[in-house]
Image (cartoon, helix red, strand yellow):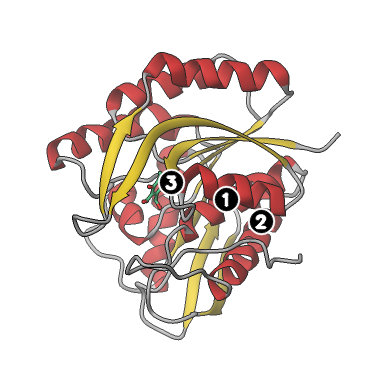
């Protein structure tokens, strides 16, 4: 049997991020991908490519998880963009319906195009309801500050401190991403599982963020865990997948480029 991985994530129609990215990554890494959509994001080409955001009905989210887990034996799930407190409740309830070996959380906190007030509610609900269920969490620079309560993360040492704090509060394995935000020639991610603190480094590919890099990283971790890798092995492979996906990125008519996973050979 091909290992199965489920993503619970938003649709981003252009194929650069969200569930589309997760499924491509799952496929490239030899897993059978399934998806439950939480929301539909459509960039607006006539309004600065802002996010038009429509939540999926909470019951429909639960129905999708029920269908996917009824057809397949799934013990590994990735959580991506959720978007509203009602969505978060639905996903927490859906996850409660069975045991999971791995719950990989990409803690997408603020999505452009949302009301700041609504986003704060969403952040708090994510921390209260989903973070405690996570076994592996992949915060970016901004999310690491929010989840650790640190005011600034300016060095790899700061990032390690954030990873420690997030692990202590959640119990999850943490892969904190420095990305292009931290200074230096390398993109540095920090892995911490409560015992090992490991720096994962690779040369930065340009200084611009590429759409979908975070989704790809968490999806690749998910696929590798579904295949039986250890968390550290999964993190190392995921970093290599993201490096390849950024190197082979795809441009278009939007001012940002998008990752492409299809060139990763493993
Ligand atoms: O990259 C974060 C992200 C995740 N999920 C969806 C998105 C985005 C960013 O646009 O649209 C659905």
Verify CB contact (< 8 Å) between mark 2 and mark 1. yes
Q: Residues within 10 Å of mark 3 (few under 14, many from 20)?
A: some
Q: Measuring from the top left, give residue 61's x and y in whole percent.
A: 46, 21
Looking at the rendered image, the disc whose residue lies closer to the viewer, 2 or 1, is: 2
- Which of the 4 quarters of the picture holds residue 159? bottom left
- Disc 1/disc 3 C-alpha distance (Å): 34 Å
Q: Residue 193 carries which label?
A: 1
Secondary structure under badge 3? Answer: loop
- Disc 3/disc 2 C-alpha distance (Å): 32 Å
Q: Measuring from the top left, give residue 9's x and y in whole percent.
A: 47, 37
Q: Name the residue under label 2.
A: 232
Looking at the rendered image, the disc whose residue lies closer to the viewer, 3 or 2, is: 3
Q: Residue at x 39, y 69 (%)?
A: 209
Q: Name the residue under label 3.
A: 13
Q: Residue at x 18, y 55 (%)?
A: 47
Looking at the rendered image, the disc whose residue lies closer to the viewer, 1 or 3, is: 3
Q: Residue at x 77, y 44 (%)?
A: 227
Verify CB contact (< 8 Å) between mark 3 and mark 2. no
Question: Who is closer to the viewer here, 155 or 44?
Answer: 44
Q: How crowded is mark 2: few (under 14 residues within 10 Å), some or many (20 or more)?
A: some
Q: Does any atom of ligand 1 lie closer than 8 Å to the CB of label 1?
A: no
Q: Which of marks 2 and 1 is nearer the N terminus?
A: 1
Q: Residue 108 carries which label?
A: none
């Amino acid at each position: 049997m091909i290992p199965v991985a489920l993503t619970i994530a938003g649709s981003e129609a252009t194929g650069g991020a969200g569930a589309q990215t997760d499924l491509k990554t799952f496929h490239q890494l030899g897993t059978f991908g399934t998806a439950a959509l939480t929301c539909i994001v459509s960039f607006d080409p006539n309004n600065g490519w802002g996010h038009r955001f429509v939540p999926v009905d909470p019951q429909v989210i639960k129905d999708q998880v029920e269908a996917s887990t009824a057809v397949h034996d799934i013990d590994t799930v990735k959580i991506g963009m959720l978007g509203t407190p009602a969505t978060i409740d639905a996903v927490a309830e859906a996850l409660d319906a069975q045991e999971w070996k791995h719950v990989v959380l990409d803690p997408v906190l603020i999505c452009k195009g949302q009301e700041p007030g609504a986003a704060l509610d969403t952040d708090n609900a994510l921390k209260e309801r989903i973070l405690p269920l996570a076994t592996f969490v992949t915060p970016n620079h901004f999310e690491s500050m929010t989840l650790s309560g640190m005011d600034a993360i300016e060095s790899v040492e700061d990032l390690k401190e954030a990873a420690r704090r997030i692990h202590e509060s959640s119990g999850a394995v943490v892969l904190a991403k420095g990305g292009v935000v931290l200074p230096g020639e390398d993109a540095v991610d920090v892995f911490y599982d409560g015992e090992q603190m490991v720096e994962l480094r690779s040369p930065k590919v340009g200084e611009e963020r590429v759409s979908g890099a975070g989704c790809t990283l968490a999806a690749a971790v998910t696929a590798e865990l579904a295949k039986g890798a250890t968390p550290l092995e999964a993190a190392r492979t995921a970093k290599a997948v993201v490096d390849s996906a950024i190197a082979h990125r795809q441009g278009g008519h939007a001012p940002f480029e998008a990752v492409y996973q299809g060139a990763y050979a493993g």
